[in-house]
Image (tube, rainbow, N blue to C red):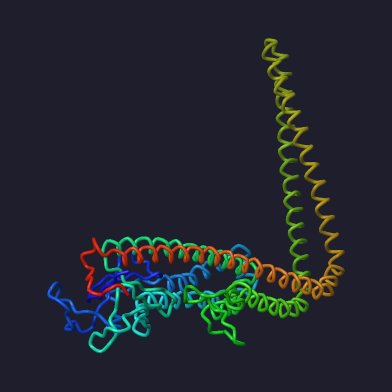
Amino acid sequence: MGQSYIRHGTNVVCTNMTCYTPRELWRVDKDGYVINSASKKPLLNIDDKKISKTFVCKMPIKKWGGLIAFLAGVVVGALIVGAVVATGGAALMVAAIVIGVGALAYAGYKGVKGVAHDCDNTLESSWQLFHSDVLIEKKNALLNRSYMTCTTGGAINIIVNPEQAKKAALYISEMNTAEIYVQLKSKLLQGVISGLTGGANPFALALSVGFYCGALNFGGFDFSETGKSNQKPDPGGDLKNTGITTGAETGVSVIQDGVKTGMSANKAGVSEAANINAQIASKVGEANMKGAESLAYGAQAANASAEAATWGSEAAIRTSNGASATSIASAELLEQMCKESSDELMHEAVQAALKKQVILAEAASLEGGKAAAVKAAKTGAWKDGLKKFGKSFGIGLAGAAVGYAVEEGTNWIENEIEKKTGDISKEVNDSDDNDTASNANYMGIIANS
C-alpha cells in the first residue's frame, strides 16, 4: 500500500482514549524540515512523540475510579450488616471513617493525576513501522502506518484523514466508556461483597486499599488492580480485590472475633445478669401498669353502678308521680345500660388484675432462673465464639469466591470490549492507510513499501 510522510499536527487516536475527539502529534521544535510548499508544517521523525492534549486515558479512570466504587461498596455492605457497631463501637467507627475518607481522597487525587499525565508516557515509548531507509534530520521518518504502544498498553495510531480520525475517536471512546462503566459497577459489587463478608473495620479497610494500590504486594505476586490494558491472564493478579483483599479482611475479622470472644467470656455473666434484671424490671413495670389499669376499670365500674342506682331511683320517682309509661321506660333503660356497663368494666378490672399476677409470676420465674442463666452464659461464651469464628471464616471464603467470580466475569466482558475496540481501531486505521485518492493530507511521495 502507499505510504505518506507525517506532518506536525497530524491526527492521532489511542485505543485507551475516552476524550471523543482526536489529538494531534506535535514536534516540539516547529522549525523543522519542510519537504514541499504545500504546507509549512515540518515533517516528523521517530523522536516526535508529543501529544497535543491528553487522551483522557481509560486506565487511571478504571483503576482509581474503581477504588472509589469499591470503597463505596464496602460502606454499603457494612451498613447492611451494621458492621461498624459490631466491630468495636465509636472509636473503630471514627478510625474507619478517617481511613475511608483518606483513601477516597487519595484515589481521587491519583485518578485526576493519572488522567492528566498518562499521555506523557508517550515520551518514553517508541514508534514502530517507521521508514527504515529515509531519515528526516538524521532520524527515521514517520509514516501513516506507524504506531506506538504506550506503557499503559494502549496503541496510538496515526490517522492522516481528519474525518477518519474523528470517526475512530468517537467509536473508540464510546467503547472505552462502556468498559469503564462495566468496571465501576463490578468494583461497587465487589465492595459490597467485601463489606458484607469482611466488615468495614479500619484494619480490614486499610488492607483492602493496600492490596488494591499494590502497597502490600509480596512474594513476587502483584495483587493490585492493574493500571494497564491488554494484559495477559495472570492467576495471581486476577485475584485483585476479590480473593486476596476479601480473604485478608476475613483474616482480620477472624482475629478480631477471637479477641472479642475472650473479652466476651469475662463479660458474659455480667451482661446476662444485667439483661435478666432489665427483663425483670420490665415485667414489674408492666405488672404495675396492669394494676393501675385494674384500679381504673374498677373506679369506672363503681361510677357506672352509681349511675345505675341514680336512674333506678329516678324510675321509681316517675312511677310514684304518675309519669307516662314512656318516661318511666326511658329511666329504666338507662338504669339497665349503666348496670351492663358496670358489669363489663368490672370484668375488665378483674382481667387486668389476673394479668398482673401472671406477669409478676413471669418476673419471679426470671429471678429464679437468673443464676443458672448467668452460669450458662459464662460457660457458653467460648463455644459461641468458636461458632462465630467458623462462621466468619466460612463467610469470608464464600465472599472471596463470589468476588473472584465477579472479577473473572467482568474481566471477560472488559476483554471482549477491548478486543472490539482494537478491531474498530484497526479497521479505521487500515482504511486511512488505503485512502490515497480522496485524502487531501496524503502526501503520496513514497512508493509502495
Q: Position of residue 246 (x, y in %)?
A: 63, 73
Tally of marks: 0
Q: Position of residue 124 (x, y in %)?
A: 37, 85
Q: Position of residue 342 (x, y in %)?
A: 75, 33
Which quadrant holds the C terminus?
A: bottom left
Return the residue found at the far bottom.
138
Left or right for 71, reference 394: left
Left or right for 310, reference 35: right
Q: Is residue 136 above or below residue 169?
A: below
The image quarter containing residue 337 is top right
Which quadrant holds the N terminus?
A: bottom left
Question: Does the image show residue 91?
Answer: no
Question: Does the image show residue 264?
Answer: yes
Left or right for 30, reference 108: left
Q: Is residue 363 above or below residue 43?
A: above
Q: Position of residue 130 (x, y in %)?
A: 33, 80
What's the residue at 71%, 38% (across, down)? 300
Decide which of 3, 391 is in the foreground and name it: 3
Decide which of 127, 140 is in the foreground and name it: 140
What's the residue at 66%, 79% (across, down)? 252
Decide which of 162, 265 is in the foreground and name it: 162
